Image (cartoon, rainbow, N blue to C red):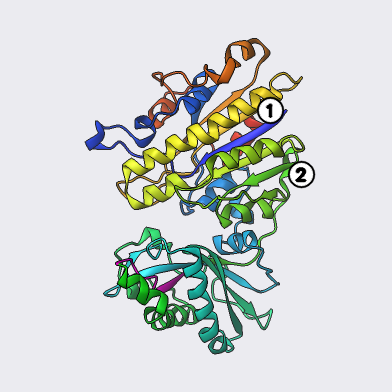
């Protein structure tokens, strides 16, 4: 059996009054997701355990069946692992956003979606000026460039016995959750982190890259924001839990880090950006190629989440439609062509990891819709028409969306989502 998980990050949404009370999933033309839901089954799963923040790291580890209370140490170390940053015992890794500060408030969590090259220049400046100043207090400061605004900072411990007061998730709140907030009210409580954040503005505000961006009427990336810091986690490998070899495909370092942390191969796809211009079709192509050697693949697309954070319903609908056509549709056709006629066939699970409603522009914790389809000999003939025509039929009532999922008799699967993986890997 071949197993595929397709995650459209943040696809789930609230009803939008100005769009006749429909959600982004209901507005979008998604015949392939609808097929999985109507030819298979559709219900809801709670991906954010009680007492935990709504984030992709927590949600996707939960989807994969991991006990977050036991294994989760923060988002920062997962991002660092995704970036191949070495973490020694005692080191603490942080997600480091390049943000826009204006009049003492957080204006933009992404620094105007700064380019990769510009971000590398700013991170190099921070390393040059802050690394020397960070030799005290038991730590050495190291910034690492990532992709666009998504970067990392590692506090390299000079003493393994040196600890923060809290050893889990040190740092500030996720910046996309506090747009418009006063910097002073949201600064990390740890003195060394506060100093880094405040000093970064002095360095970045006057940098030639930001001077040029301002002249081009673009937002400056004039401050860093440090959040979700933690130490390197240790988790059982995915193959130990489910007996399958597998891979993960994503355009963002966080999901690559999750994959490496649980022993999945990470496949880099050219043109995978983590934004609406990502190489959707390339992700599906590489996923199908990996299934010729492995049993499992997880494909993650970040674009719907980014559009939710922007509060742009039209772009979110476009991202969902691109995901459906270029990832879900291509995967369905490829799986049918390659594996439907084998003895075991394939199983496909599609879902968002969490809600990112355009009305609130951040993540929320409601149970998300999911759909599972398993290839079956008795339906292969009707599903495998030339060019996948059956898959591309017009959207039917009761397809893949939040309202349809609520009508399922299965109910909401448990807070750790472990029932979902058990169900997905069962022979049912």
Work out whether residue 309 or residue 211 is closer to the camera in this orientation and state it.
Answer: 211
The answer to whether one can see residue 380 in this image is yes
| Residue 172, horizontal then vertical, whole percent | 44, 68
Q: Which residues are magenta?
A: 217-226
Give me the C-alpha separation between circle 1 and circle 2: 16 Å
Mark 1 Cα-neighbour bin, 10 Å: few <14, some 14–19, many ≥20: few
| Residue 410 can be seen in this image | no
Label 2: which residue?
A: 240
Asked if the residue under mark 2 is in contact with the one under mark 1, i.e. CB atoms within 8 Å, the reply is no
Which image quarter: residue 11? top left
- Near mark 2 (Cα within 10 A), the count class, few <14, some 14-19 or many ≥20, is few
The residue at 67%/32% (across/down) is: 3
Characterize the magenta stretch by its predominant secondary structure. Answer: loop
Q: Earlier in the sequence, mark 1 or mark 2?
A: 2
Magenta stretch contains residue 410: no
- Could you tell me which secondary element the residue under label 1 belongs to? loop
Q: Residue at x 67, y 80 (%)?
A: 161
Q: Examine the rendered structure and indicate whether residue 369 appears above or below residue 89.
A: above
Q: Indicate the secondary structure of the residue bearing disc 2.
A: helix
- Residue pointed to by mark 1: 426
Q: Quadrant of the C terminus?
A: top right
Q: Position of residue 208 (x, y in %)?
A: 40, 79
**Residue at point 43%, 64% (across, down):** 114
Query: Is 126 placed left or right of 107 in the picture?
Result: right
Q: Position of residue 324 (x, y in %)?
A: 48, 33
Q: Position of residue 317 (x, y in %)?
A: 37, 38
Q: Is residue 294 above or below residue 40?
A: below
């Amino acid at each position: 059996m071949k197993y595929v998980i397709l995650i459209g990050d943040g696809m789930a949404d609230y009803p939008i009054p100005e769009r006749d009370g429909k959600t982004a999933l209901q507005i979008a033309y998604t015949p392939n997701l609808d097929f999985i839901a109507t030819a298979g089954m559709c219900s809801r799963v709670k991906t954010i355990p009680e007492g935990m923040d709504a984030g992709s790291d927590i949600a996707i580890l939960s989807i994969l069946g991991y006990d977050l209370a036991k294994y989760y140490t923060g988002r920062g170390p997962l991002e660092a692992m995704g970036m191949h940053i070495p973490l020694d015992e005692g080191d603490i890794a942080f997600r480091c956003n390049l943000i826009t500060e204006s009049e003492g408030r957080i204006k933009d969590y992404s620094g105007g979606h700064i380019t990769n090259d510009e971000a590398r220049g700013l991170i190099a400046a921070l390393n040059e000026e802050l690394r020397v100043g960070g030799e005290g207090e038991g730590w050495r400061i190291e910034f690492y460039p990532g992709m666009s605004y998504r970067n990392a900072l590692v506090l390299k411990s000079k003493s393994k016995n040196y600890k923060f007061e809290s050893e889990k998730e040190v740092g500030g709140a996720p910046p996309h959750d506090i747009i418009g907030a006063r910097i002073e009210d949201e600064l990390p409580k740890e003195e060394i982190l506060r100093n880094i954040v405040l000093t970064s503005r002095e360095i970045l505000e006057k940098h030639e890259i930001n001077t040029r961006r301002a002249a081009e009427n673009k937002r400056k990336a004039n401050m860093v924001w440090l959040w979700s810091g933690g130490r390197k986690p240790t988790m059982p490998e995915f193959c130990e839990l489910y007996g399958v070899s597998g891979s993960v495909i994503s355009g963002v370092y966080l999901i690559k880090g999750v994959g490496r942390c649980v022993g999945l191969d990470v496949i880099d796809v050219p043109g995978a950006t983590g934004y609406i211009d990502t190489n959707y079709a390339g992700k599906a192509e590489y996923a199908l190629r990996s299934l010729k050697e492995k049993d499992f693949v997880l494909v993650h697309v970040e674009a719907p989440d980014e559009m939710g954070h922007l509060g742009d319903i039209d772009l979110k609908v476009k991202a969902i439609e691109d995901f459906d056509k270029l990832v879900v549709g291509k995967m369905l056709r490829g799986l049918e062509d390659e594996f439907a006629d084998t003895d075991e066939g394939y199983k496909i699970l599609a879902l968002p990891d969490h809600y990112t409603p355009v009305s609130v522009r951040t993540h929320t914790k409601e149970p998300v819709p999911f759909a599972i389809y398993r290839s079956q000999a008795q339906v292969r003939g009707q599903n495998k028409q030339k060019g996948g025509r059956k898959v591309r039929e017009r959207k039917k009532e009761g397809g893949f969306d939040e309202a349809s999922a609520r009508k399922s008799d299965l109910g909401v699967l448990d807070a750790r989502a472990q029932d979902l993986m058990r169900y997905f890997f069962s022979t049912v």
